[in-house]
Amino acid sequence: MPVWQKDLRKLSNLIVDTDKDWLGYIIKNLGAIQIPRTDDPATLLEGLLWYRKDTDEWKYSPDGTNIKILGDWAVISDLTVDSDCDYVEWTGLDILTDGVYVIFGAWKNPTSSDTGILLFINGNETSTNYYTQILKGSGTNIYVARRDFPEVAVAHANQSNSFILFVLLAPDGYLRAIAPTNMNSPATPEVEVRCITSTFTVSNITSIRIQASVSGGIGAGSRFILCRVKGT
Protein backbone atom coordinates (compact mmCIF):
# COMPACT_ATOMS: atom_id res chain seq x y z
CA MET A 1 0.00 0.00 0.00
CA PRO A 2 1.14 3.57 -0.47
CA VAL A 3 2.44 5.45 2.49
CA TRP A 4 1.61 9.15 2.51
CA GLN A 5 2.82 11.97 4.67
CA LYS A 6 1.30 15.26 5.78
CA ASP A 7 0.79 17.00 2.42
CA LEU A 8 -0.36 15.02 -0.61
CA ARG A 9 -0.29 18.14 -2.78
CA LYS A 10 3.44 17.53 -3.10
CA LEU A 11 4.67 14.52 -5.03
CA SER A 12 7.72 14.47 -2.79
CA ASN A 13 5.46 13.46 0.12
CA LEU A 14 4.13 10.35 -1.65
CA ILE A 15 5.93 7.03 -1.28
CA VAL A 16 4.88 4.16 -3.54
CA ASP A 17 5.76 0.47 -3.07
CA THR A 18 6.54 -0.34 -6.69
CA ASP A 19 7.02 -4.07 -6.11
CA LYS A 20 3.48 -4.78 -4.89
CA ASP A 21 0.51 -6.12 -6.86
CA TRP A 22 -2.09 -3.35 -6.78
CA LEU A 23 -5.28 -5.45 -7.24
CA GLY A 24 -3.72 -6.94 -10.33
CA TYR A 25 -2.46 -3.61 -11.67
CA ILE A 26 1.32 -3.69 -11.54
CA ILE A 27 3.18 -0.38 -11.47
CA LYS A 28 5.69 -0.82 -14.26
CA ASN A 29 8.60 1.16 -15.63
CA LEU A 30 8.64 3.53 -12.67
CA GLY A 31 12.08 2.45 -11.61
CA ALA A 32 13.64 3.39 -8.33
CA ILE A 33 12.68 6.91 -7.31
CA GLN A 34 15.91 8.66 -6.46
CA ILE A 35 15.40 11.28 -3.75
CA PRO A 36 17.18 13.63 -3.57
CA ARG A 37 20.19 14.30 -5.79
CA THR A 38 22.06 17.30 -7.18
CA ASP A 39 22.78 16.00 -10.68
CA ASP A 40 21.15 13.95 -13.42
CA PRO A 41 21.88 10.20 -13.45
CA ALA A 42 24.79 9.19 -15.66
CA THR A 43 22.87 6.09 -16.75
CA LEU A 44 19.23 6.53 -17.75
CA LEU A 45 16.52 3.89 -17.67
CA GLU A 46 13.06 4.00 -19.21
CA GLY A 47 10.69 5.43 -16.60
CA LEU A 48 13.43 6.51 -14.20
CA LEU A 49 12.27 9.35 -11.93
CA TRP A 50 14.41 11.59 -9.73
CA TYR A 51 14.30 14.82 -7.75
CA ARG A 52 16.91 17.58 -8.17
CA LYS A 53 17.05 19.39 -4.84
CA ASP A 54 19.49 22.00 -6.18
CA THR A 55 16.98 23.20 -8.82
CA ASP A 56 13.77 22.00 -7.08
CA GLU A 57 12.75 19.92 -10.10
CA TRP A 58 11.26 16.50 -10.63
CA LYS A 59 12.77 14.88 -13.73
CA TYR A 60 12.23 11.63 -15.57
CA SER A 61 13.36 9.72 -18.63
CA PRO A 62 10.46 8.51 -20.80
CA ASP A 63 12.63 6.30 -22.99
CA GLY A 64 16.00 5.79 -21.28
CA THR A 65 17.61 8.40 -23.52
CA ASN A 66 15.91 11.77 -23.11
CA ILE A 67 15.30 13.80 -19.96
CA LYS A 68 12.09 15.74 -19.29
CA ILE A 69 10.83 17.88 -16.43
CA LEU A 70 7.58 17.13 -14.63
CA GLY A 71 5.31 20.15 -14.76
CA ASP A 72 5.49 23.30 -16.86
CA TRP A 73 5.56 25.99 -14.19
CA ALA A 74 8.18 26.93 -11.63
CA VAL A 75 8.85 29.83 -9.26
CA ILE A 76 12.41 31.09 -9.67
CA SER A 77 12.28 33.80 -7.02
CA ASP A 78 9.78 35.08 -4.45
CA LEU A 79 11.17 38.38 -3.19
CA THR A 80 9.72 40.71 -0.56
CA VAL A 81 11.57 44.00 -0.20
CA ASP A 82 12.76 44.65 3.37
CA SER A 83 13.39 48.38 2.97
CA ASP A 84 12.75 51.08 0.37
CA CYS A 85 15.01 50.58 -2.63
CA ASP A 86 15.63 51.67 -6.23
CA TYR A 87 15.42 48.33 -8.04
CA VAL A 88 15.27 44.55 -7.90
CA GLU A 89 17.18 42.39 -10.35
CA TRP A 90 17.42 38.75 -11.38
CA THR A 91 20.57 37.44 -13.09
CA GLY A 92 21.68 34.07 -14.43
CA LEU A 93 18.50 33.65 -16.47
CA ASP A 94 18.12 31.77 -19.76
CA ILE A 95 14.90 32.49 -21.63
CA LEU A 96 15.89 30.14 -24.45
CA THR A 97 15.53 27.27 -22.00
CA ASP A 98 12.78 28.71 -19.81
CA GLY A 99 10.58 29.96 -22.65
CA VAL A 100 8.70 32.82 -20.94
CA TYR A 101 9.20 34.80 -17.75
CA VAL A 102 6.23 36.04 -15.74
CA ILE A 103 6.60 38.52 -12.89
CA PHE A 104 3.78 39.09 -10.41
CA GLY A 105 4.26 42.46 -8.72
CA ALA A 106 2.52 43.91 -5.67
CA TRP A 107 4.27 47.23 -5.34
CA LYS A 108 4.06 50.19 -2.96
CA ASN A 109 5.27 53.66 -3.89
CA PRO A 110 6.45 55.21 -0.60
CA THR A 111 7.45 58.55 -2.11
CA SER A 112 5.57 61.82 -2.42
CA SER A 113 5.86 61.71 -6.22
CA ASP A 114 4.17 59.67 -8.94
CA THR A 115 6.61 56.87 -9.68
CA GLY A 116 7.04 54.47 -12.56
CA ILE A 117 8.50 50.98 -12.69
CA LEU A 118 10.92 50.49 -15.58
CA LEU A 119 11.99 47.23 -17.24
CA PHE A 120 15.57 46.63 -18.37
CA ILE A 121 17.16 43.44 -19.74
CA ASN A 122 20.73 42.21 -20.05
CA GLY A 123 22.20 45.26 -18.36
CA ASN A 124 20.96 47.67 -21.03
CA GLU A 125 19.68 50.48 -18.81
CA THR A 126 19.45 53.21 -21.46
CA SER A 127 15.78 54.17 -21.32
CA THR A 128 15.64 55.45 -24.90
CA ASN A 129 16.52 51.96 -26.16
CA TYR A 130 12.94 50.91 -25.38
CA TYR A 131 9.37 51.96 -26.23
CA THR A 132 6.08 51.59 -24.34
CA GLN A 133 2.52 51.70 -25.68
CA ILE A 134 -0.21 52.41 -23.10
CA LEU A 135 -3.96 51.77 -23.10
CA LYS A 136 -5.69 53.04 -19.96
CA GLY A 137 -9.26 52.94 -18.66
CA SER A 138 -10.42 55.28 -15.89
CA GLY A 139 -14.15 55.32 -15.23
CA THR A 140 -15.65 55.88 -18.68
CA ASN A 141 -12.53 57.57 -20.06
CA ILE A 142 -9.96 55.96 -22.34
CA TYR A 143 -6.38 57.19 -22.62
CA VAL A 144 -3.65 56.07 -25.03
CA ALA A 145 0.00 57.11 -25.28
CA ARG A 146 3.41 56.01 -26.52
CA ARG A 147 6.59 56.68 -24.58
CA ASP A 148 10.26 56.25 -25.42
CA PHE A 149 11.17 54.42 -22.22
CA PRO A 150 10.22 50.99 -20.79
CA GLU A 151 7.52 51.76 -18.21
CA VAL A 152 5.73 48.71 -16.82
CA ALA A 153 3.45 50.49 -14.34
CA VAL A 154 2.84 53.74 -12.44
CA ALA A 155 1.78 54.33 -8.84
CA HIS A 156 0.67 57.71 -7.56
CA ALA A 157 2.31 59.22 -4.47
CA ASN A 158 2.03 56.92 -1.44
CA GLN A 159 -0.18 54.46 -3.32
CA SER A 160 0.17 50.88 -4.47
CA ASN A 161 -0.01 49.10 -7.80
CA SER A 162 -0.22 45.48 -8.83
CA PHE A 163 0.82 44.08 -12.19
CA ILE A 164 1.57 40.91 -14.12
CA LEU A 165 4.54 41.29 -16.45
CA PHE A 166 5.04 38.78 -19.28
CA VAL A 167 8.58 38.89 -20.69
CA LEU A 168 9.20 37.21 -24.05
CA LEU A 169 11.99 37.15 -26.61
CA ALA A 170 10.62 37.41 -30.16
CA PRO A 171 12.12 35.21 -32.93
CA ASP A 172 13.77 38.31 -34.44
CA GLY A 173 15.62 39.01 -31.18
CA TYR A 174 13.56 41.91 -29.80
CA LEU A 175 12.16 42.11 -26.29
CA ARG A 176 8.36 41.85 -26.27
CA ALA A 177 6.77 42.42 -22.87
CA ILE A 178 3.12 42.86 -21.88
CA ALA A 179 1.80 44.11 -18.52
CA PRO A 180 -1.80 44.55 -17.34
CA THR A 181 -1.87 46.70 -14.19
CA ASN A 182 -4.27 47.68 -11.41
CA MET A 183 -3.63 51.19 -10.09
CA ASN A 184 -5.00 54.30 -8.33
CA SER A 185 -6.94 54.43 -5.04
CA PRO A 186 -9.22 51.49 -4.11
CA ALA A 187 -12.35 53.67 -4.52
CA THR A 188 -11.34 54.77 -8.05
CA PRO A 189 -9.38 51.89 -9.58
CA GLU A 190 -7.85 52.28 -13.01
CA VAL A 191 -6.67 49.59 -15.42
CA GLU A 192 -3.76 49.88 -17.78
CA VAL A 193 -2.32 47.54 -20.38
CA ARG A 194 1.22 48.26 -21.47
CA CYS A 195 3.42 46.66 -24.09
CA ILE A 196 7.18 47.22 -24.09
CA THR A 197 9.67 46.62 -26.90
CA SER A 198 13.41 47.05 -27.24
CA THR A 199 15.03 48.86 -30.16
CA PHE A 200 18.00 46.48 -29.95
CA THR A 201 18.19 42.73 -30.44
CA VAL A 202 19.64 40.04 -28.19
CA SER A 203 20.26 36.34 -28.62
CA ASN A 204 19.01 35.52 -25.11
CA ILE A 205 17.55 37.23 -22.04
CA THR A 206 19.88 36.54 -19.12
CA SER A 207 18.94 39.26 -16.64
CA ILE A 208 15.86 41.34 -15.77
CA ARG A 209 15.83 44.54 -13.75
CA ILE A 210 12.72 46.25 -12.34
CA GLN A 211 13.72 49.81 -11.47
CA ALA A 212 11.83 52.74 -9.95
CA SER A 213 11.91 56.05 -11.80
CA VAL A 214 12.25 57.88 -8.45
CA SER A 215 14.91 57.12 -5.86
CA GLY A 216 13.59 54.76 -3.19
CA GLY A 217 10.42 54.26 -5.21
CA ILE A 218 10.06 50.55 -4.41
CA GLY A 219 8.69 50.50 -0.88
CA ALA A 220 9.28 48.06 1.94
CA GLY A 221 6.82 45.17 1.73
CA SER A 222 6.66 45.22 -2.08
CA ARG A 223 6.66 41.69 -3.41
CA PHE A 224 7.85 40.33 -6.75
CA ILE A 225 7.44 36.70 -7.81
CA LEU A 226 9.42 35.61 -10.87
CA CYS A 227 8.20 32.46 -12.61
CA ARG A 228 9.19 30.52 -15.70
CA VAL A 229 7.76 28.02 -18.12
CA LYS A 230 10.28 25.22 -18.08
CA GLY A 231 11.78 23.75 -21.20
CA THR A 232 11.60 20.02 -21.78
Image (cartoon, helix red, strand yellow):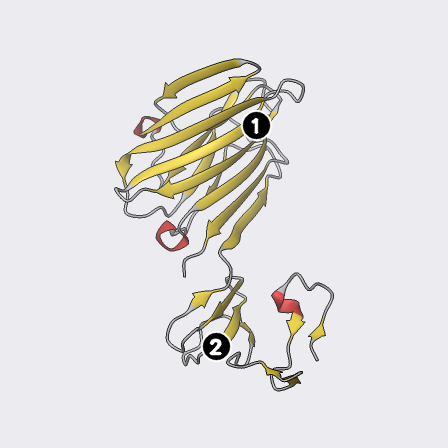
Task: Where is residue 208? Give x, y as percent.
Answer: 42, 42
Q: Position of residue 228 (x, y in %)?
A: 47, 50
Badge 1 crowding class, 10 Å Cα cut-off, few under 14, some 14 to 19, many 20 or more, is many
Front residue of 37/195: it is: 195
Residue at left offset 41%, top offset 51%: 93
In the image, which is nearer the foreground, mark 2 or mark 1? 2
Residue sitting at x 48%, y 15%? 142
Q: Is residue 184 above or below residue 169?
A: above
Q: Earlier in the sequence, mark 2 or mark 1?
A: 2
Outermost residue to the top: 141
In the rendered image, which quarter is residue 161 located in?
top right
Q: Is residue 52 above or below residue 96?
A: below
Residue 40 % position (x, y)? 44, 72
What is the C-alpha distance between the residues marked 2 and 1?
45 Å
Q: Secondary structure at mark 2?
A: loop
Say which quarter of the image contains residue 118. top left
The residue to which callout 1 is attached is 182
| Label 2 CA crowd tier, 10 Å (few <14, some 14–19, many 20+) | some
Amino acid type, residue under disc 1 in the picture: Asn
Quick check: 43 above or below 83? below
Quadrant housing the C terminus: bottom left
What's under tag 2, amino acid-wise? Gly
Callout 1 secondary element? strand
Question: Is the residue under label 1 in contact with that under label 2 (CB below 8 Å)?
Answer: no
Q: Can residue 204 be spotted in the picture?
A: yes
Q: For mark 2, what is the residue?
A: 47
- Residue at far front of view: 24
Of residue 93 and residue 69, the one placed in the foreground of this image is 69
Instruction: Say if residue 151 shows up in the picture.
Output: no
Residue 27's label in the rendered image is none
Please provide percent x and percent y for residue 98. 41, 53
